[in-house]
Image (cartoon, rainbow, N blue to C red):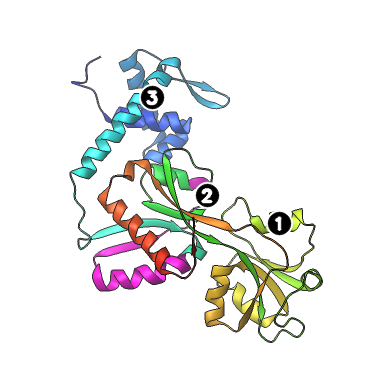
Amino acid sequence: MSLANTDLNLFKIFDVIYREANITKAAQALGITQPAVSNALSRMRQLFNDELFIRTSKGMKPTPLAQNIYPSVRSALKLLRISVDEGRSFDPTSETTFNLCVNTVSQLVILPDIIPELSFNFSNIKLITHSIQTIDLIKALNCGTLDVAVEHGINMPAHIKRKALFDDDYVCVVRKDHPRIKQQLTLKQFESEQHLLLVEQQCGYNPLEVALAEQNIKQNVIFTGNNYITMPPVLIAADAIMTIERTLAQSLHNHLGIQILEAPFKVPKRTTFLYWHENAESSEANQWLRETIINAVKNSRIITAQ
């Protein structure tokens, strides 16, 4: 096989098919049509004189040859991307747009520090935050539509790098003039009072839900909502308890008339991570963005993850 007349894009498509194990998903990750991926696969089969991927009930299964060449293909693609990034130095005063997925609580920690800094010192840099479901985060990082993501702990493949940013625990909040709850909340009060439940749009492990179940603690939920904007007005109008992350509670306390009370039971702390693709590891622009986010967390008054 000679590389003289070989389309190197085929190796990128091979890499994505291998990881996605599905032609349709590979096309979505690459931002091209399914027939284009199928056509590329046909060309690769001719190039290697091997089927490479066999369609099964569990997806496209790589042949022994595909399994043998995959590590080398990935390594070569990584070296190419590093070479491109190293040849392009990053100037934070130049026009640059970064795409991020940052959960709501993390936005309260990061954005109040970053946005003024950009406004005064790096006005040509633009940030765009996206709301992306957990199941689609890996795909967005893989295909480069996201530069970084800031989320709670997620099961990620090895090629998605991460750094722990901060830990957050849970507290209970009520309106300041609650008729029965004053400066301390007992477990008996927690179980007897009404509750507002704020559910997250992202699916996954919820330490509060697990803690309540494990400790057999009852919660009389009268309203369940998933909007971080509408829940606080409901809270200050109702004689109810809402159990949320301390960072969010502190933000509400600074702007609304609520009390923050220690939860009368134990809930494990929740760690928030910064995620990025391994291909962006050596990118000066991505490094600058990651360092900016890390510094914003350090400048906040929350507990940095150890």
Q: Is residue 173 visible?
A: yes
The residue tagged 1 is 211
Instruction: Look at the image and give the residue range highlighted in magenta.
Output: 107-136
Quadrant position of the N terminus in the picture:
top left
Residue 7 colored magenta? no
Label 2: which residue?
134
Residue at 47 percent across and 57 percent down: it is 131
Circle nearer the viewer, 1 or 3: 1
- State yes or no: discs 1 and 3 in contact (Cβ < 8 Å): no
Q: Residue 178 location in percent, x, y?
A: 72, 84
Find disc 3 in the rendering and name its residue.
70
Q: Badge 2: few (under 14), some or many (20 or more) residues near its Cα, within 10 Å? A: some
Residue sitting nearer the eye, 174 or 1: 174
Q: Give the SS element for disc 1.
A: helix
Q: Residue furthest top?
A: 49
In the image shown, does 34 or 63 lie closer to the viewer? 63
* Image x and y of residue 53, in percent: 45, 21
The residue at 61%/79% (across/down) is: 233
> Would you say residue 228 is visible in this rendering?
no
| Residue 19 circle label | none
The answer to whether residue 303 is above or below residue 57 is: below
Who is closer to the viewer here, 183 or 73? 183
Identity, as a three-letter code, of the amino acid under mark 2: Thr
Mark 3 element type: helix
